[in-house]
Amino acid sequence: MVMACRNINRRKHIGLQQLSSLTETGRSFLGPVKSSKFIIGERSHESVLTCSILRLLENLDLNSSVGQLLHETVQSQKNAYGTGTNTLLFLAGAWSTAALECLQQDIPISVIVSVMSEGLKSCRKEVVPLQISLTTDIVDNTGDTRRYPFLGTLSIIPSPLVQIPSDWIQREKLRKDVSSQASTPSFSSRPSSEFSSRSSYSQSVPQIMLQAPQTNLFTNSYTSKSRLSHSRHFNKSENMSYQTSSEEYHNSHKCNDLVQLAVGLSHGDHSSMALVEAAVKCQYQNVRVRKKNCTVPFRFDISKISTCCLPGIPESFSCVYSGYITLISINYTTIIRELQNQPLRVVLIDGDFKENYHHLGFNGLGKVKTELESVPDQERQWVDYILEILTQLNVKLVMVRGNVSENLMERCMHSNLLIIGPVSHHVLQDFAEVTGAVQVTYATQLNEDCVGSDVNVSLWRAGQLNPKDVSKRVAILIKAEGVLLVTAVLTSPIIAQMQAKEDHFWTCAYRLYHALVDEKVFLGGGAVEVLCLSHLQGLIEQSHKKVDLDCSGQLLTTSWVASSQELYRPAVLKALAGGWHRYLSSVVYNTGTCSSESEASTFIQNFLQKTTGSGCPILYLQKEYNKVISGILNSGLPSKLKEILRVYDVVTPKMEAWRRALDLVLLVLQTDAEIITGAEYTQLNSQETEELLLL
């Protein structure tokens, strides 16, 4: 039986081509040294500097269906994990290019989908041994007073994937001599209600190279009995010297230090991660205050973290405070001064604080009103009624989740009553727990049982900040005993950089959060991707051997589908591996140690050949990485840096970024195929015989 089908024209796979093209926009965002992009508004003509791929996609004209799918996929990753979007974007583009390469080789789409999915699934299992467990009480060990005064001075990337300049050791020794006079650390373990991310060293000593320890790769050794006992490169006698159980490995390679974890997850952004680490410790202290006799292990609650951005302010003002900090109009300065240093009664409004605000399920009379009734009179009566309720309850502070009536704001200002809004639901919830207030939807629901107490309001950095620098607004601090809320105050003298600074903070916060939730991290800086490449290389060799046996007739195939899949498996796996190869090449190129991407690609290829040819990739990585670290430590830096010369990656967000990237590519691939074939698939005529592929 002869089977005929249309040989799909690769040039018509517009979706894959568009996906590959769109992902190029964020190529410079990958790796430790990111090249920011300016986003200029068409109407306002204001510029914003960003390194966030989501911010970039939001400002691109994505009219195509592929562009919308890409945006939704990246947005879904961001909403779910807060990190991993750059990896998702780059791999989606790399694997769309890989799929196009497979189509150019006339590989059936069903085979591409099947083999790529199986290859990724196999890689996800292969990298499990690279996970490092975190101790369950890692945050409880915050009493450690160790400091790392040289953190942030490390200007070279301790990784064999990055070529170290020959004159680096001499320059590092010179830096050591200069930095010996500086003693202020970038990271410290001391708990404090205020934490500044600036260090005296960073202000006094210029950086010789860009600080980018993200590509710090594998620094721990790992030998697994289950893996080496099945290796084709070792016989049974050789394996006996490497046999170490997985359980023994994980027990001896646990991370039990919060500072070490924060440094490893910072990926070079020390200032942002320092603020995150301080926020975790501050929240830990607040939990101990609220639950004095509770023995339940502390869990970092990222929903209890907020940010307050102060553009145009020097970076030295960046810090972390316990409580809620926000900006309000300068007109409230007099009221704040009268209310500070005294306990206030507070009410919480979970909705808009307006006369015409109704619940979504409310069906009123609409535009029907009495003949003498007018909207301004009705709103004025409502404002009078609300003020009467608040006055009777002796309320001085109102926190609102939604929008607030301007007339009500003005009347309350004259009555020395402070209204703060909009605030997030988590802020209202936390103040409700510690003050005894009950959240209400409408002010008419207020009564004595709904009012909270013992809230303090004060001006933040009174006399130090010029209101003109923050658009005629002042920063206020709202606190209550036992509140878990922690506010990170982010400042930057460059207004266009403010949004990027906030994005960097939240990226670091979510990395640390997911690491603590998963209670495990990956050895980072490319170790996972290198192992995937090595694993796929082994699968490709096995597939070639199996195809050779099939061709020689020693193995019998059961079906055409199985035989075609085995025939094309090496090519598809090679294309899949090519995506990770381009990923690592871009990371290395973005470190600035290679003059071109082709040079970085060649370097990665040579390193991979040595890793795969060693017989045991993990042991080879361990040996090479230890060489680099030893060279750095021998350059004159203190030996205690050895324990923080590690880079970690979060587990779940990375795995999900891989999965979402491939799912997007395969969805576009199959959708393109359906659009190309359509109803004409079964209507082949004589003019199309040149495009037939006989199977």
Image: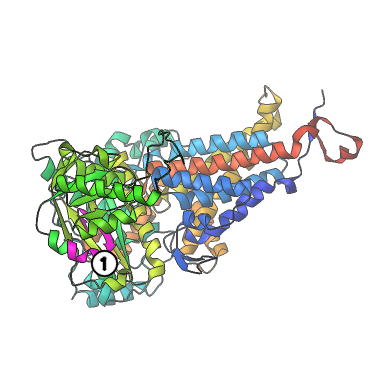
Near mark 1 (Cα within 10 A), the count class, few <14, some 14-19 or many ≥20, is some
Percent across and percent down for residue 661 are 53, 44
Q: Nearer the viewer, residue 510 or 497?
A: 497
Quadrant where the C terminus lies?
Answer: top right
**Which residue sits furthest right?**
686
Residue 608: % across, % down: 50, 52
Q: Which residue is mark 1?
A: 330
Q: Nearer the viewer, residue 82 or 246?
A: 82
**Left or right: 434 as drawn, with respect to 127:** left
Q: Is residue 408 above or below residue 300?
A: below
Which quadrant: the N terminus?
A: top right
Q: Quadrant of residue 307?
A: bottom left
The answer to if 325 sits in the magenta stretch is: yes
Residue 506 is a magenta residue: no
619 to the left or right of 475:
right
Magenta segment boundaries in residue numbering: 319-335
Q: Position of residue 226 (x, y in %)?
A: 39, 33
Q: Residue at x 25, y 37 (%)?
A: 445
Look at the image and tell me whether residue 580 can be seen.
no
Give the answer, above or below, for where 679 lies relative to 138: above
What's under tag 1, amino acid-wise? Ile
Task: Count up the numbered dots.
Answer: 1
Q: How is the image coloured?
A: rainbow
Residue 86 can be seen in this image: yes
Answer with the quarter of the image where residue 541 lies: top right
User: Which secondary structure lies at badge 1?
Assistant: helix
| Residue 435 versus residue 549 in the image, above or below | below
Q: Which residue reaches farthest front?
A: 372
Residue 547 at x, y percent in the picture: 65, 34
